[in-house]
Amino acid sequence: YATFKQQSKFSTWMYRVALNTAMVFLKKEKKHQIYHTLEERHDFAEEAYDTDKDEQLNVFYQAVQELNAIEKALIFLFLEGQSYREIAENLGISEVNARVKLNRTKERIQQIIKKYKYEF
């Protein structure tokens, strides 16, 4: 409270203090989680390398490069595991519109891959 300079409402200042505190906490927690995740996955290098999966990923990412910005955003939000509601909120569209656009984008990716005669 001693740092409050009365340049804004107290509630606004308190909100920023709480927000900054939460952000600092999350950053520390994220570093902590990454460290533990790396410790748990020490056997990662021992996993067999699958060239077919690598090729499939390359083909997929090449197909994604041909999409427009909205379609790319839809696909990457979907791949991050976000729900239709979250995708809709992030892009500022309705949930139904997000579903329709995402399905059309998936179909477009399939068409692009077939156009280059890549089969999975």
Image: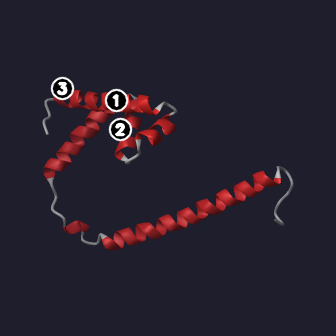
Total numbered labels placed on residues in the image: 3
Task: Name which of mark 3 and mark 2 comes first in the sequence.
Answer: 2
* Residue 33, placed above or below residue 70: below
The picture quadrant where one finds residue 74 is top left
Front-lying residue, 74 or 50: 74
Quadrant in which the C terminus is drawn: top left
Residue at left 65%, top 63%? 21
Front-lying residue, 31 or 74: 74
Q: What element does badge 3 sit on?
A: helix
Residue flagged by tag 1: what amino acid is it?
Leu
Characterize the local packing of mark 2: few (<14), some (14-19) or many (20 or more) Cα atoms within 10 angstroms.
many
Viewer can see residue 104: yes
Q: What element does badge 1 sit on?
A: loop
Residue occupied by mark 1: 67
Residue flagged by tag 3: what amino acid is it?
Lys
Residue 96 point in image, percent of width and height: 42, 30
Q: Residue furthest front?
A: 96
Question: Which mark is on residue 115?
Answer: 3
Quadrant in which the N terminus is drawn: bottom right
Viewer can see residue 69: no
